[in-house]
Image: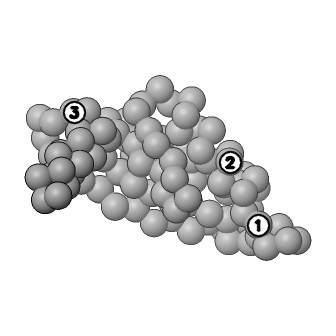
């Protein structure tokens, strides 16, 4: 499964930034060893249900260690029997785009 999620503290720093708390969450994801990718809005992680949601929980806990409140948004693509989809979906999209040119 792929899970794209965003977790942020309920309170921002003096400059309105949340990057320290988000960095703590992303570090948990990177330390997990699961395939992952972070962009400007979400972190996507790939693995089995229990391992992915354990990482999401621990990433949320990392934010809660820095703020009394957290906001979590997630989207999941659950496709049993498939792996490598963090890149596979993009490869198929690019191939489809080449066919349209």
Looking at the image, residue 89 lies above or below residue 35:
below
Residue pointed to by mark 2: 23
Looking at the image, residue 61 lies above or below residue 11:
above
Q: Quadrant of residue 27?
A: top right
Residue 3 in view: yes
Disc 1 versus disc 3: distance between alpha carbons?
35 Å
Upstream in sequence: badge 2 or badge 3: 2
SS under mark 1:
loop
Residue 88: give x, y in percent of width and height: 23, 39
Residue 89: give x, y in percent of width and height: 23, 46
Query: Dot 3, how many residues are within 10 Å of its Cα: few (below 14), some (14-19), or many (20+)?
Result: some
Q: Are marks 2 and 1 in contact (CB under 8 Å)?
A: no
Q: Label for residue 17?
A: 1
* 62 lies left or right of 47: right
Disc 2 versus disc 1: distance between alpha carbons?
11 Å
Q: Label for residue 4?
A: none
Looking at the image, residue 65 lies above or below residue 72:
above
Q: Nearer the viewer, residue 67 or 18?
A: 18
Residue 75: give x, y in percent of width and height: 34, 61
SS under mark 3:
loop
Residue pointed to by mark 3: 83
Q: Residue at x 39, y 54 (%)?
A: 4
């Amino acid at each position: 499964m792929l899970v794209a999620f965003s977790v942020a503290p309920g309170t921002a720093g003096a400059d309105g930034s949340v990057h320290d708390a988000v960095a703590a969450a992303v570090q948990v994801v990177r330390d997990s060893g699961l395939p992952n990718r972070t962009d400007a809005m979400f972190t996507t992680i790939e693995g089995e249900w229990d391992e992915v949601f354990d990482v999401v929980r621990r990433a949320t806990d990392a934010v809660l260690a820095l703020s009394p409140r957290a906001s979590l948004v997630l989207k999941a693509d659950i496709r049993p029997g498939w792996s490598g989809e963090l890149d596979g979906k993009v490869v198929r999209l690019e191939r489809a785009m080449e066919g349209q040119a």
